Image (cartoon, rainbow, N blue to C red):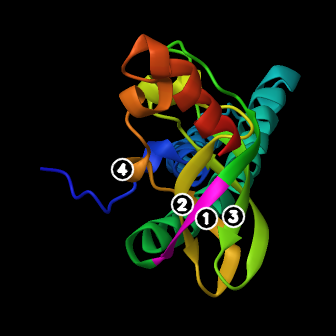
Amino acid sequence: MENPNRLPALQTGAGIARLTGTILTPVALVMAGATALVWVSLPATPSTDDWITLAVTAAFVPILAGIGLPLLVVGARRLARLRRVLREGAPARAVITAITGLSNDPDERGASRIDLAVDLPGRGTVNARVRQVVPLPLVPFMAPGVRVPVRVDPADPTVAVIDWRFAEPRERIAGAVAGSALVDLAAGLFG
């Protein structure tokens, strides 16, 4: 059984960055090996095409490593911090102020950028931006004005994670009974 306090890696922008770095870094190493093989296989008098092949192969190594390594390191550090905030952060409520990248299509879903106004008791309201995948059953109900449960870093409340485990179930957000659907939706948007 999966740990409920564990944030799945591909549910955040940081996890996606880490995965991209994990893919690009070994590709850069393979390209370095390919460059060495091209160098070793050059004939005694290389042609212009041979030099171009060597140059192009060698050019990709620093490009891929320059993109892959930082994504791997920064993504892993950011993901570790978000997991710590989800596990140990202070619970709070937030209102979505903007949301982009939302999709109902299960095959086209990525991390959405969600701007939040986090209400911190005794400290006022703090703006935070998260990149998380919205659970598919909640996608139709996510819009500016909707309240969501979050966990924030007590040291830096601008670092937040939406705690989907405590998001209201679909029946409560949309209304389980047709007569109360508009009331529940209005309460979610304005309450």
Q: Determine contact: label 2, label 1, CB under 8 Å.
A: yes
Q: Which residue is mark 4?
A: 165
Task: Give how far apart the Cα atoms at labels 3 and 2 are.
Answer: 8 Å
Q: Amino acid at mark 3?
A: Val
Residue 14: percent from left, percent from top: 58, 54
Q: Amino acid at mark 4?
A: Arg
Residue 167: percent from left, percent from top: 44, 46
Q: Which residue is mark 1?
A: 160
Q: Is residue 37 above or below residue 81?
A: above
Q: Residue at x 67, y 61 (%)?
A: 70
Q: Is residue 178 above or below residue 109?
A: above
Q: Which residue is mark 2?
A: 150
Q: What is the magenta range?
A: 89-94
Task: Give how far apart the Cα atoms at labels 4 and 2 are.
Answer: 10 Å
The answer to whether residue 8 is seen in the rendering is no
Task: Give how far apart the Cα atoms at labels 2 and 1 are.
Answer: 6 Å
